Image (cartoon, grey):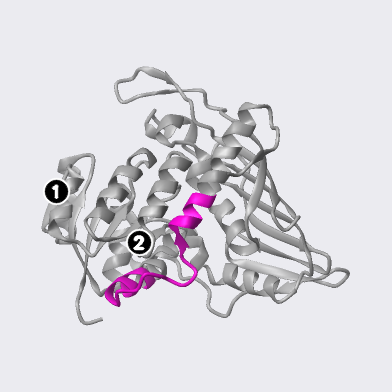
Amino acid sequence: MANLVRIVLFGNSQAEAVQLPALNHIGGNEVVGIAGYNADKAATTASDWGIEHATSDWRELLGLEPDLVIITTPIDLHYEMTRAALDAGAAVLCEKPFTIDTQQAEELTELAAGRLALINYQLRWNPNRRRMRALWRDGFVGELQHVRADLVLDTANFRRRPYTWWSQAALGGGVMGAIGTHMVDCIQWMFGPIEAVSARLETFVTHREDAEGTERAVTSEDYAELSLRLQNGARANVVTSLALRGVGRWLFEVTGTEGSMRLDREQHLIGGPHGEDVEPLESDNSWMPPEQYGIRGKGPFAALEAPFLAAIVEAVARNHTHVEEAATFADGLANVRVLAAARQSSQAGGTWVPCR
């Protein structure tokens, strides 16, 4: 890559903890500006990382003529920011879930046609998930029958978290969009479209105190249970939560007519034909821990950010409009449709709702 890719960051928290260390590690880029809700915090981050421009007004950064805009803000801000970045001629990487509703996602997908415009589903960069996908395509499990995806994290301080945008459904808060959407994306990426959803969404922590100490009602879900009907005839079940103390599950199971596979905590992939002992199936190229990249965040999401960003930076440098295996805006739209159908289903008592 002859020229450094000029990057601006909309959003400070995720950028400071994960993306700036990752971008610094992979090279080939220059972060020229960062925008955060808190101007002082953004200025501190900029000083720490040698970024020339820091602001609380993200619009100012588009005047820097960035090659790539990375958006990691609350979901209700994604639409306006993404549209402005595309209008400015930049490539875009937008945090998931894509938008608040399907109409916004449809508009942005149409606007981004022929452009490099991606959604941050970095689990696609896990070599074990790619191995699992390749094995299924090669007929390892036979005809797909069922997928089970659990992402239930025992979060020690979850019940004590303050009331923020994350507590508000209207702003895109809730566990389904925060982590459940990763499981939905992996299912559609591996096995094709989801055509209908039956869902149960629950809020176990119903009130939280805001920054002023006022108790506020929580409108977002902290537990989501989704039954999915795939276009290929198979069924899938997704359970995700941060609120269940003493319970921790992170698994992805695939069962077919001939065999099965199981990925545990993104690291241990096993499987085999029915009636035989399961064996390790891990990829030869496992993902590296976050500290390998100087990242303070923990776990697979943080660890996989660096190789994912490396592929994007290279694509921007080469003026490519596509990154192999990366989630496009069309993929983001498909996932938003599933989330929207899940909310509608839960409100209607779990009835099946088509994803459209």
Which span of residues is magenta-colored?
Answer: 311-334
Which residue is denoted by mark 1 in the rendering?
60
Asked whether residue 227 appears in the rendered view, the answer is yes
Against 168, is 176 above or below? below
In the picture, the disc for residue 232 is none
Res. 168 visible in picture = no
Q: Give how far across and how far down residue 356 sits, in percent.
A: 58, 44
At numbered mark 2, what does the secondary structure look like: helix, strand or loop?
A: loop
Give the Cα separation between the discs numbered 2 and 1: 28 Å
Q: Residues within 10 Å of mark 1 (few under 14, many from 20)?
A: some
Q: Residue at x 46, y 70 (%)?
A: 288
Q: Which quarter shows the N terminus?
A: bottom left
Within-10-Å neighbours for mark 2: few <14, some 14–19, many 20+:
many
Q: Amino acid at mark 1?
A: Glu
Residue under pointer 2: 295
Quick check: is 314 in the magenta stretch? yes
Work out whether mark 2 precedes mark 1 in sequence or the reverse, and give the earlier one.
1
Percent across and percent down for residue 25 are 30, 71
As drawn, 114 above or below 28: above
Name the residue at 34% across, 50% down: 72
Is 24 placed left or right of 223 in the picture? left
Horizontal side of residue 236 vs 112, given as left or right? right
Closest to the observer, 232 or 346: 232
**Could you tell me residue 143's position as x and y percent?**
79, 66
Q: Is residue 208 above or below residue 262?
A: above
**Secondary-structure class at tag 1:** helix
- The reply to whether callout 2 and callout 1 are in contact (CB within 8 Å) is no
Magenta stretch contains residue 332: yes
Q: Residue at x 33, y 65 (%)?
A: 22
The residue lying at 20 percent from left, 46 percent from top is 58
Tally of numbered tags: 2
In-front residue for pair 33/337: 337
